[in-house]
Image (cartoon, rainbow, N blue to C red):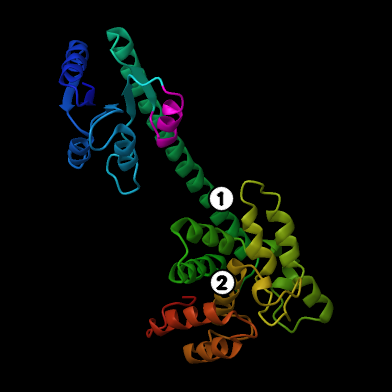
Amino acid sequence: MDWITVVDDDVTNLKMAGMILSKHSMRVTALKSGTALIEYVKTNHPDLILLDIKMPGLDGFETLAQLRAENSLAADIPVIFLTGDDKQGSEARGLQLGAMDFIKKPFVPEVLVLRVRHTIELVRLQRNLAAEVERKTKENETLSLHVVQTLAEAIDAKDTYTNGHSGRVAEYSREIARRYGYTEKHQDDIYMMGLLHDVGKIGVSDTIINKTSRLTDEEYEQIKKHPVLGDRILKKIKEMPELAVGARWHHERYDGSGYPDGLAGKEILEEARIIAVADAYDAMTSRRSYRDILPQETVRREIENGKGSQFDPVFADIMLEIMAEDPEYKLREL
């Protein structure tokens, strides 16, 4: 049963609206003022409010403004104004405040019932559509994440010594971002960027990536191409252009001596500065062909020494804070 609250200082209008709507199987609550409505909706949530404009005390416009306040529990209840006012501008003001419709007084019963039902049905359709869009969006995000994780695993599989690297970099990046104050959505975005920061290695020879001896200058130049290759790959994903940020700039250095673009300081996008710290941390806490996992104190010293040269000092400090909370040294390749 649809629940309608009618607000009017005229008892005759209240009785008339109540009689018409009740005959059409609607539950009706009658209130005589805007102040009474504001109190009422603190503990009640009708499907629709019929609100008179001209009332002593709070008029309809002032009442609706309070209903639509950000902290109001009634902000989403649809409102139709009841009015005998034909002044130009009243409807425009009401619509700007968030009214759904206007009904002229005295009531025409058929018009009142049709307008009320139409508005309730419209709002329900909007809410159902919004819920369906949200559900589909979450499905797509889950699918996208699964695809990205699979791709990240394929990238890591090229290198015998980087098992799980992309996933750990993504996790460290998200935690740094969380502590820095990123929204949950922004944290999820940087997680995806972290997962794909090394995607450009797809275009680098496996022989070079897995070489156990020192790289020649020519081989090192090939390795240095992977940020540009990654940027080129990810920019083709038009739906998520931000993915390319981590791929292109995770080897830039805060002092400008990095590659591929030699950016410095805040010229490097913030997400890339976060991923750079996470990437370096995981490189030092993972096994390589030429060494084992570095001791935690050595890693801490390297990050400390890199503040302001290799790393953004703010994000380096957050990484050091995370390390300080890991006395058993669990944040490393297992």
Q: Residue at x 62, y 68 (%)?
A: 272
Q: Which stretch appears magenta?
A: 87-99
Asked if one can make out residue 177 in the rendered structure from this viewpoint, the answer is yes
Image mark for residue 111: none
Where residue 52 appears, as percent x and y from the top left, is 28, 26
Q: Which amino acid, mark 2?
A: Ile
Residue hosting label 1: 147
| Position of residue 213 measured from the top left corner of the image (x, y, whole percent) | 72, 83
Q: Is residue 157 left or right of residue 218?
A: left
CB-based contact (under 8 Å), mark 1 and mark 2? no
Badge 1 marks a residue whose secondary structure is helix
Q: Answer with left or right where residue 320 lies relative to residue 262.
A: left
Residue 198 seen in the figure: no
Q: Residues within 10 Å of mark 1 (few under 14, many from 20)?
A: few
Q: Nearer the viewer, residue 81 or 222?
A: 81
Query: Alpha carbon of mark 1 to alpha carbon of mark 2: how far?
Result: 23 Å
Q: Main secondary structure of the magenta part?
A: helix
Of 152 and 75, nearer the camera is 75
Q: Secondary structure at mark 2?
A: helix
Q: Quadrant of residue 311?
A: bottom right
Which quarter of the image is occupied by the N terminus? Answer: top left
Image coords of residue 283 (percent x, y): 58, 78
Q: First in sequence: mark 1 or mark 2? A: 1
Looking at the picture, how far across and down is residue 113, in whole percent? Answer: 29, 13
Residue at 47% from the left image edge and 38% from the top image edge: 136
| Residue that label 2 marks | 274
Which amino acid lies under the numbered mark 1 shown in the image of this protein? Val
Q: Is residue 31 above or below residue 273?
A: above
The total of numbered circles placed on residues is: 2
Q: Nearer the viewer, residue 244 or 156?
A: 244
Q: In front here: 62 or 138?
A: 62
